Amino acid sequence: MEQFDVLIIGGGAAGLSAGLYSSRAMLKTVVIEKIGFGGQILVTDEIENYPGFPKGIKGPELSIMMEEQTRRFGAELKYEEVVAVEQLNGPLKIVHTSENSYCTKTIIIASGGSHKKLGVPGEEDFSGKGVSYCAVCDANFFRGEEVVVIGGGDAALDEGSYLTGIVEKVTVIHRRDQLRASKILQERALANPKMDLLLSHVVEEFRGTDLMDRVLAKNLKTGES
Ligand SMILES: Cc1cc2nc3c(=O)[nH]c(=O)nc-3n(C[C@H](O)[C@H](O)[C@H](O)COP(=O)(O)OP(=O)(O)OC[C@H]3O[C@@H](n4cnc5c(N)ncnc54)[C@H](O)[C@@H]3O)c2cc1C
């Protein structure tokens, strides 16, 4: 069984950075990634808030550069899925992947996260092309445009109110006939002239050509789309 000093689970920005540091420290390092090195960055069209790229950079391009930089100091990068870990308390831990088993002194978990999806048609296709899961990251792409925020909790109203400082108008779509958000956020939303509420509606589809430009919603009370 191949042995490493450091085994990193996940090859997103965090895992590749960890791999860069540990391989530069002359530790025998492997980064294991199940989908694509770069992680969420891979599905991000344009990144404008990463220092060193004043004109912004495409997510896939940044992913390739990060991958290259991590390889440069000798880290091994493997396309496999970690499925089990054994002997966590022992000096040597065993990591099983979809294809192999490895022995390692240290494990770094950088498996990231994934956003809660609606699961409607068009969502995957337009992810990073009009469908976003992070207002702070992406608001600038929608400057001066009309934006829809889906949800009725604190996060939806918080992100929605942040967006009103940048975009033309925000419509919050929520499936229930009342919001779940705290009262203070609801009051602020109602008082915000740039924020509209569309209650008892569910989003059914995202449409567009290259970029998403239409959101289809259904009125749950009347059944109309
Ligand atoms: C559409 C979109 C736009 C974004 N825009 C921006 C932006 O403009 N600016 C910004 O700062 N941030 C942005 N973000 C957020 C940013 O991409 C994330 O904060 C960042 O990628 C997190 O990095 P990470 O390495 O922690 O996790 P991730 O990128 O999630 O990487 C974790 C990796 O671990 C892998 N993994 C998980 N489990 C296993 C396993 N069992 N075995 C092997 N591999 C595994 C996953 O496949 C994944 O590749 C955006 C995110 C999205 C989705």
Image (cartoon, rainbow, N blue to C red):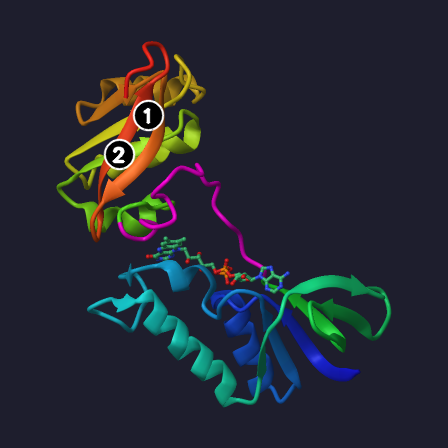
Which residue range is magenta in the image? 111-129
User: Count of labels shown?
Assistant: 2
Query: Which residue shows up at 26% across the image and 38% down it?
Result: 163
Which of the marked residues, 2 or 1, is nearer the chain's N terminus? 1
Disc nearest the viewer among 2 and 1: 2
Query: Which residue shows up at 37% across the image and 40% down it?
Result: 121
Secondary structure found at label 2: strand
Does residue 120 lie above or below 194 as drawn?
A: below
Q: CA distance from mark 2 to mark 1?
A: 10 Å
Secondary structure found at label 1: strand
Query: Which residue shows up at 43% across the image and 76% down it?
Result: 66
**Where residue 224 sits in the image (x, y, percent)?**
28, 16
Is 168 displayed left or right of 123 in the figure? left
**Where residue 42 sits in the image (x, y, percent)?**
40, 64
Is 60 displayed left or right of 8 in the figure? left
Q: Is residue 117 magenta?
A: yes
Examine the image and state in which quarter residue 199 appears. top left
Front residue of 23 and 121: 121
Marks 2 & 1, CB-CB < 8 Å contact: yes
- Judge: label 2 CB < 8 Å from ligand 1: no
Quarter that holds the C terminus: top left
From the image, tell me which residue sits under label 1. Answer: 173
Q: Label 1 is placed on what type of residue?
A: Ile
Quarter that holds the N terminus: bottom right
- Checking the image for residue 215, the label placed there is 2
Front residue of 73 and 30: 30
Query: Which residue shows up at 27% across the image and 52% down it?
Result: 129
**Where residue 44 sits in the image (x, y, percent)?**
34, 59
Does residue 215 lie above or below 94 as drawn?
A: above
Q: Residues within 10 Å of mark 1 (few under 14, many from 20)?
A: many
Does residue 120 lie above or below 80 as drawn?
A: above
Examine the image and state in which quarter residue 58 appears. bottom left
